[in-house]
């Protein structure tokens, strides 16, 4: 059974930093694209960052470029999101996701939530002003 478990969320003041981690277990397919998404109540889930299977390419939402950094350790099956310069508008539930078909390697709209077939339960990030 494939599981994604996020950790590292919490509450910080504006300008602060957090580091989210995601552990992938039970996965037996070709190496997946992985991503972080976030969602606030009443809004659609939005893509934050995507990383290709070998980690060679990364993609970011315009709202987080220059502040967030996605990385992966395939030997440990972990995904990380380093978040710096956090702002109140970054407050959301953050989800780790994996795409077993590795569609992100084709380019295009790599942040489509529908492309990702495995999801974690989420970790809350709250940024106060």
Image (tube, rainbow, N blue to C red):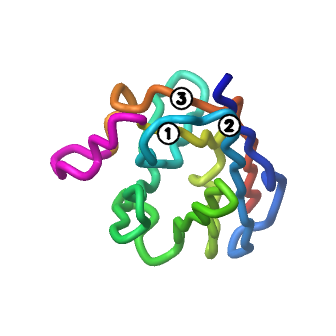
Which residue is disc 3 drawn over?
118
Q: Residue at x 41, y 56 (%)?
A: 53
Alpha-carbon span between mark 1 and mark 3: 5 Å
Above or below 29: residue 89: below
Q: CA distance from mark 3 to mark 2?
A: 7 Å
On whether residue 59 falls in the magenta region, the answer is no
Circle 2 sits in a helix, a strand or a loop, which is it? strand
**Residue beneath disc 1:** 98
Q: Residue at x 63, y 68 (%)?
A: 83
Q: Determine whether label 3 and label 2 are within 8 Å by CB.
A: yes
Is disc 1 in contact with disc 2, using a CB cutoff of under 8 Å?
A: yes
- Residue 4 is labelled as 2
User: Could you tell me residue 119's position as x and y percent?
Assistant: 58, 30
Check if mark 1's residue and mark 3's residue have beta carbons within 8 Å: yes
The CA distance from mark 1 to mark 2 is 8 Å
- In terms of depth relative to the viewer, which is nearer, 98 or 50? 98
Say above or below: 83 vs 7: below
Tell me which numbered mark, 3 or 2, is placed earlier along the sequence.
2
User: Where does the image place residue 91, in percent across and percent down from the top left?
Assistant: 65, 48
Classify mark 3: residues with Cα within 10 Å, few (<14), some (14-19) or many (20+).
Answer: some
Q: Residue at x 34, y 31 (%)?
A: 115
Query: Badge 1: few (under 14), some or many (20 or more) residues near its Cα, within 10 Å?
Result: many
Sequence-first disc among 1 and 3: 1
Q: Position of residue 40 (x, y in %)?
A: 59, 33
Q: Earlier in the sequence, mark 1 or mark 2?
A: 2
Q: Which residues are magenta?
A: 100-110
Q: Residue at position x 41%, y 64% from top? A: 54
């Amino acid at each position: 059974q494939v599981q994604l478990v996020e950790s590292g969320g919490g509450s910080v003041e504006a300008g602060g930093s957090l580091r989210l981690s995601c552990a992938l277990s039970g996965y037996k397919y070709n190496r997946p694209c992985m991503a972080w998404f976030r969602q606030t109540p009443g809004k659609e889930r939005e893509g934050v960052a995507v990383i290709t299977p070998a980690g060679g390419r990364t993609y970011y939402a315009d709202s987080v470029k220059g502040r967030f950094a996605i990385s992966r350790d395939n030997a440990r099956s972990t995904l990380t999101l380093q978040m710096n310069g956090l702002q109140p508008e970054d407050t959301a539930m953050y989800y780790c996701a994996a795409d077993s078909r590795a569609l992100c390697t084709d380019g295009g709209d790599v942040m489509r939530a529908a492309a990702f077939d495995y999801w974690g339960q989420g970790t809350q990030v709250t940024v106060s002003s």
